[in-house]
Image (tube, grey):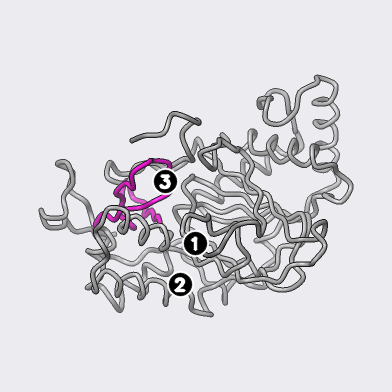
């Protein structure tokens, strides 16, 4: 791969950022049009894997422990060992996403669902906090005010633009789907990057420059580039609403060319041929690497009955095999413990 050193005005604290100037190759470069029908991207749970979860839940009940007050050793799922090893490698060095199908969520209690989902997370990585309250499992439902800029986007039924979350990996477990809409969509960051590099290289410097982000766990918006190339891997961080909000808070509104760059990125990510669209059915669990895969969701219509409304559970994980990040692109694995936020 070819890299170039960028001008001194884009340096940060003595570190010289590197711009990747050769197209990415390998399994992380994919398009939805190429892999839509591939069965390999979805794993149907086996009877043995479900039985292993049931055994672990039984042992947890006997111990008197429950979410979030247990550790990996309290939730042994031997039938999952090879599957989770494969998943970990696929997320970091493969396509960057994977779907597990067939969790019998209809026969589990809410407590059991929390326990097995968190238990799988403990066996795959380290769960991290998703908000200032310290929640380790996030409930994704239409409960927020869409007119409040501070509302987290996932708390509404509006279109959720392509973005990444502040953790190494995100898991999304479907408990109930919407009456209509709510299509989940994934896009390869590498494929978007290759398009920018080939046809719009004049914007690359802006994407490697630092931007202010709100909602990364700090009281004051902090700086981070969108793209970062380090140790042979390209990483990405993005949620446009929080970038715009971060610059507003810092009283540094985005310039015309900065908005053009973000518009360009959004327009490429939304291309039909790049997107991999799917409806997550109850019992589906979608995993994605936040450095290599963008995720989105269309708007949706909910049922009137609160007991039937769309509901998903989100899990953020810090991974032991995660890539080494550049100094100017610090890891963002969730929020600090309550009352310990960084100023």
Residue 337 x %, y %? 49, 30
For the residue carrying disc 1, how many other residues have a C-alpha within 10 Å: few (<14), some (14-19), or many (20+)? many
Q: Which residues are magenta?
A: 209-237
Q: Is residue 175 left or right of residue 227?
A: right
Residue 254 x %, y %? 27, 65
Q: CA distance from mark 1 to mark 2?
A: 8 Å
Residue 104 x %, y %? 84, 50
For marks 3 and 1 on the same chain, the one whose residue lies earlier in the sequence: 3
Residue 22 x %, y %? 29, 65
Image position of 343 with respect to 315: above or below: above
For marks 1 and 2 on the same chain, the one whose residue lies earlier in the sequence: 2
The kind of secondary structure element at disc 2 is helix
Check disc 1 and report the residue beneath it.
294
The kind of secondary structure element at disc 3 is loop
Q: Quadrant of the N terminus?
A: bottom left
Number of the front mark, 3 or 1: 3
Return the mark for residue 185.
none
Which residue occupies 72% across, 24% down? 74
Q: Is residue 284 left or right of residue 210?
A: right
State yes or no: discs 1 and 2 in contact (Cβ < 8 Å). Answer: yes
Return the mark for residue 216.
3
The kind of secondary structure element at disc 1 is strand
Which residue occupies 56% across, 35% down? 134
Q: Quadrant of the C terminus?
A: top left
Q: CA distance from mark 3 to mark 1?
A: 17 Å
Which residue occupies 70% across, 52% down? 173
Q: CA distance from mark 3 to mark 2?
A: 22 Å
Pick whichever, 151 or 109, lies toward us.
Answer: 151
Check disc 2 and report the residue beneath it.
269
User: Quadrant of the rendered structure where residue 99 is?
Assistant: bottom right
Which residue occupies 54% across, 50% down? 91
For the residue carrying disc 2, how many other residues have a C-alpha within 10 Å: few (<14), some (14-19), or many (20+)? many
């Amino acid at each position: 791969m070819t890299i170039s050193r960028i001008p001194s005005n884009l340096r940060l604290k003595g570190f010289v950022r590197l711009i990747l100037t050769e197209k990415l190759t390998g399994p992380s470069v994919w398009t939805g049009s190429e892999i839509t029908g591939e069965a390999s991207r979805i794993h149907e749970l086996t009877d043995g894997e479900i039985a292993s979860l049931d055994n672990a839940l039984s042992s947890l009940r006997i111990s008197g422990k429950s979410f979030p007050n247990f550790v990996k050793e309290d939730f042994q799922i031997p039938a999952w060992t090879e599957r989770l090893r494969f998943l970990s490698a696929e997320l970091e060095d493969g396509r960057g996403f994977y779907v597990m199908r067939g969790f019998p969520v209809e026969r589990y209690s809410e407590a059991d669902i929390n326990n097995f989902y968190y238990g799988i997370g403990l066996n795959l990585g380290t769960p991290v906090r998703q908000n200032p309250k310290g929640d380790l499992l996030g409930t994704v439902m239409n409960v927020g005010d869409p007119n409040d800029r501070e509302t987290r986007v996932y708390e509404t039924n509006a279109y959720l633009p392509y973005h990444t979350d502040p953790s190494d990996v995100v898991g999304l477990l479907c408990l109930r789907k919407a009456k209509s809409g709510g299509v989940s969509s994934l896009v390869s960051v590498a494929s978007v990057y290759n398009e920018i590099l080939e046809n719009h290289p004049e914007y690359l410097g802006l994407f490697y420059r630092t931007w202010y982000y709100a909602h990364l766990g700090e009281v004051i918006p902090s700086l981070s580039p969108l793209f970062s190339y380090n140790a042979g891997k390209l990483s990405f961080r993005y949620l446009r609403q929080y970038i715009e909000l971060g610059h507003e808070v810092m009283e540094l509104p985005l310039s015309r060319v900065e908005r053009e760059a973000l518009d360009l990125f959004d327009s490429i990510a939304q291309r039909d041929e790049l997107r991999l669209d799917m409806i997550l059915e109850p019992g589906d669990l979608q995993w994605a690497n936040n450095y290599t895969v963008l995720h989105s969701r269309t708007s949706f219509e909910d049922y009137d009955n609160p007991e039937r409304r769309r509901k998903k559970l989100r899990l953020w994980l810090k991974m032991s095999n995660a890539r080494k990040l550049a100094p100017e692109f610090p890891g963002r694995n969730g929020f600090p413990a309550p009352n310990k936020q960084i100023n």
